[in-house]
Amino acid sequence: MSAESSRSNPPLQTSHPIKFLIIGGGIAGLACALALRRVGHHALVVERRDRRSARGEGGIRLPPNLTKIFFHWGLRDALREKGLVSHTILFTRYESGEYLGRQVWDQDVLRETRGVFMLMTHADLHDVLYEAAIRAGVRVRFNADVTSIDPEEREVELATGEVLTGDVIVGADGEYGPCRTAVLGKEVRGNPTGLAMYDTVVPGRYLPEHLASLREDNGVFVAFGEGRAIVAYAVHGGADYAFQFYGPDENPEGKYGDSPTVSIAEITRTLDPRLENVVRHAQDDGRLVLIGEAAHPFPPGTIQATAMAVEDGAVLAKLFSHLSEDRQIESFLFAFQDLRQARARSVRAGEFASAFFMTIDGEGAAQRDAAMKAKSTSGGNVLEGGEGEANSLWEEIRTIFGYDCEDEADDWWVQWGLLRERALSRQTDDADVDYGEGEGEGHAAPSLLDFSAMTVQVSSTASDYDAEAW
């Protein structure tokens, strides 16, 4: 039996389609729009850049909790065409290249998660989602720069002066886009962590001989160093390799795509000499991001950054597949926040822990390396079994991979959504009853979950528009 989910049946369709205006045409925005169209809602995506720029650069890792969502959506073949399935991680020391061990993805674990671990480029994944979204009927407008947002009126103004409206506005415009500022009322920046990440793609012919095993099993290469680290893996069918170099940087400003604030030469100053050829051919294409500086909760380059964005869209669509009246919009948005906030916070903490686990120095690094080498010598996987930090890290990964966001949304509907709908139905029935004097006199209908404190604004004419004109 395949470890991959085979579920790609048509999802539940809403009986009350509304209009979603999605700001941001990257992977998050396209995935959200596709998910909403799959359940019958209308989706318009506006992106300030052209399509080529929006596709992004560099490599991207798709963990099982992400690939199983795409498999549910019928994208298995498209992903297989552009991506590679990975089964191993090879660990070495950054400075010397000393072998620390290997981790082979446990097939039983993957079978439980119903997904696989895949490697591809950001541009290729963007293409897969864009083509699927267009086929599903999503409208995408590139070169549409949003200059202002009015949450109360649920409208946005473009740089051209054009005004667009939606019943629900979805902000998928990243850490420096206008949506986060509109929600918080001010710009919010994170605290710098002292790490920078240089992201590049290098032709496969420059891969050093000691990493040749990566060609055989589409493995991921991880090098641990003192304040530095590398993550690398095959893309473009193995013709190229995505490299992400982590190194120290105290500059408090910067975002993905900015000019580098530290050079690749400085980041790789203590690197294993056998990787010098990779660095030499990475200099022209790299991008730098300051981990922790961006307002977006997940820094680029981490394994779960894209997964969390897609999970958001999948959960939103699952909830709104049950929409039958405008009055439900507020409670569904409330449920979305309730389901996603704790999940994203927990996974984000784990991603930063992983980054620091790779770059720890001193006694902590010595203990980590010794534990991994001992496990490798005994013939085991280096991230599981035994005691200690490495084992805890692997157990956390197992839990994250096994999470099914769409099942969580379905559970919310069964446990809370239906309960509220039935209570509303009973309230309506009771309102028609004449209690008369005595026991029922002066009593209101049975109380419901109180959403009066919600500040989400929604349209009172959610279905009153021309979908074609929009």
Image: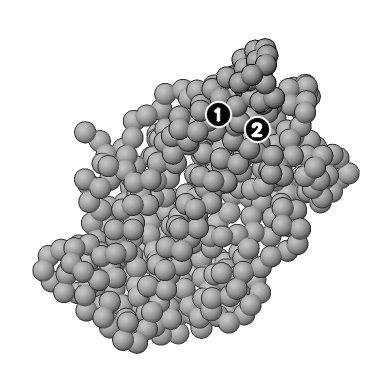
Q: Using the image, tell me which numbered label, if any, was put on residue 119.
A: none
- Label 2, on which residue? 329
**Crowd band around label 1 with a 10 angstrom C-alpha radius: few (<14), some (14–19), many (20+):** some
Query: Judging from the image, what secondary structure is the residue with disc 1 in?
Result: helix
Contact check, label 1 and label 2, Cβ < 8 Å: no
The amino acid type, in three-letter code, at marker 1 is Arg
- Label 1, on which residue? 420
Instruction: Judge from the rendering whether residue 172 lies leftward or rightward of residue 145; answer left or right.
Output: left
The amino acid type, in three-letter code, at marker 2 is Ile
**71 or 461, which is in the foreground?**
461
Of the numbered discs 1 and 2, the one sitting upstream in the chain is: 2
In this rendering, is residue 263 above or below 419?
Answer: below
Identify the image quadrant of residue 411: top left
Q: What x and y, as percent, mark residue 166?
A: 74, 34
Residue situated furthest front in the rendering: 438
Q: Is residue 461 visible?
A: yes
**458 or 161, which is in the foreground?**
458
C-alpha span from label 1 to label 2? 13 Å
